[in-house]
Image (tube, rainbow, N blue to C red):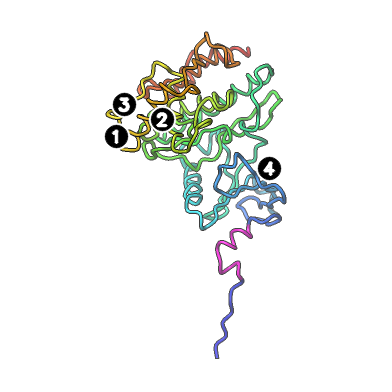
Amino acid sequence: MYFIRLAPPTARNPLIRAISSLAPGSILQGTYWNYRILNHNHVKGDSTHISDVFKAEVIPHENYHNTPKAPKWAFVKGALPDNATAILNLERERHAYHLPGVSSSQYFRKMYDVIDDSTIALEWLDTTLAELKYQPNDMGTHSLVVAVLRAALTSCAVLEDSKYVNTDYKPANILLSGIGSDCIIAKVGDLGLMVPVGHLRHAQPYAMRAPEVYLGQACAEPSQVRAVAAMFLCWIKPGVLGMWGSYHPFLNEAWSIVKIKRLFPEWDIPTPDEVDGHLIKTVVNCAQSMTETEPKLQDSYLLTRRQKTLEISDQLRDLLRFMLVPDPVKMPSASSVLASRELQAFENLGA
């Protein structure tokens, strides 16, 4: 007679095991430290992330004298085994920290540990740009914008050197600490959509998507620089770009293209004969029609000095217009923006 010892349910089912390992109170074993998942601290973000994310207490190992000084908190991200997209994004994020300059840069969130193939521990910061409201009359707003611009553009420059692009710049992925102090810390987080140049098409959030990506090209270095500027514009004036206000999901892309045209009336939306693919031909044809007939999308020259509907300085307006140029051939690189007179003029406002 043979006796078969059944493994516990959590050992037999990787999905149950993964869920139980991230339950409140669970302790994850790390290289330098352990991480206790906190109760009632599941991180909401902007409700678009597909991984499970938690705040965790960092617990030094017993031999902590021989390890780096432990931070107080960590950000734990896990992908369930039945979520192929989350697993792929987590794999990309782990790979990103092996790129030259990423792990050593002060402008990317630090990765503390790879717990296992589906769980990583990262640096904890206090808030995100998405959680802060733009306050044009606040003395600290200029310092905040400068810190975020420097962080985002330098991160783009680091990636340019590795021939990679971050296709997910948005306010929720700009991480902040020290708000209200003289030392604002700004970092780029969530690197799950960081890919080689030319690797992804139809990428980037609608509001941050570059015109050439809407028209079928893959994300390249200028696309991410434009996304940084679009991210700021959307933070300052929510809804000015992207699908907000669209009548139907089928219209989202055309609606977003017309909003770009509204900011840059000199830009010509291509005709269907000038683009490839039935879907894109339909999108540009619809966008052309909306430009002529939709009252909500009539011209609004937000980025000209004579139009004061944006509560920003002329220097910031000039910088955003410089970065948002719709022609990909004329789009500046991150390095050229960092060295530009437009950025210097804006930074000098706080001097």
Cα gap from disc 3 to disc 1, whole angstroms: 10 Å
Mark found first going from the N terminus, 3 or 4: 4
Name the residue beneath numbered marker 3: 271
| Element marked by disc 4 | loop
Q: Is residue 125 above or below residue 82?
A: above
**Does 115 sit above or below residue 318?**
below
Q: Which amino acid type corresponds to the residue marked 2 in the rendered image?
A: Glu
Identity of the amino acid at label 4? Pro
Residue at left 50%, top 46%? 94
Q: What amino acid type is highlighted by mark number 1?
A: Asp
Q: What element carries label 2?
A: helix
Asked if marks 2 and 4 touch (Cβ < 8 Å), the reply is no
| Residue at screen point 60% across, 12% down | 349
Measuring from the top left, give residue 298's x and y in whole percent: 47, 19
Residue 200 pos. (x, y %): 39, 39
Q: Residue furthest top?
A: 306
Q: Distance between the residues labelled 3 and 2?
A: 25 Å
Q: Which residue is tagged 2?
A: 221
Pointer 4: what residue?
71
Which of disc 2 and disc 3 is earlier in sequence?
2
**What range of the chain is rendered magenta?**
9-21
Instruction: Name the residue beneath numbered marker 1.
Output: 276
* Type of amino acid under label 3: Thr
Q: Residues within 10 Å of mark 2 (few under 14, many from 20)?
A: many
Say which quarter of the image contains residue 283.
top left
Please report whichever mark, 1 or 4, sits nearer to the chain's N-terminal start.
4
Nearest the viewer among 42 and 97 is 42
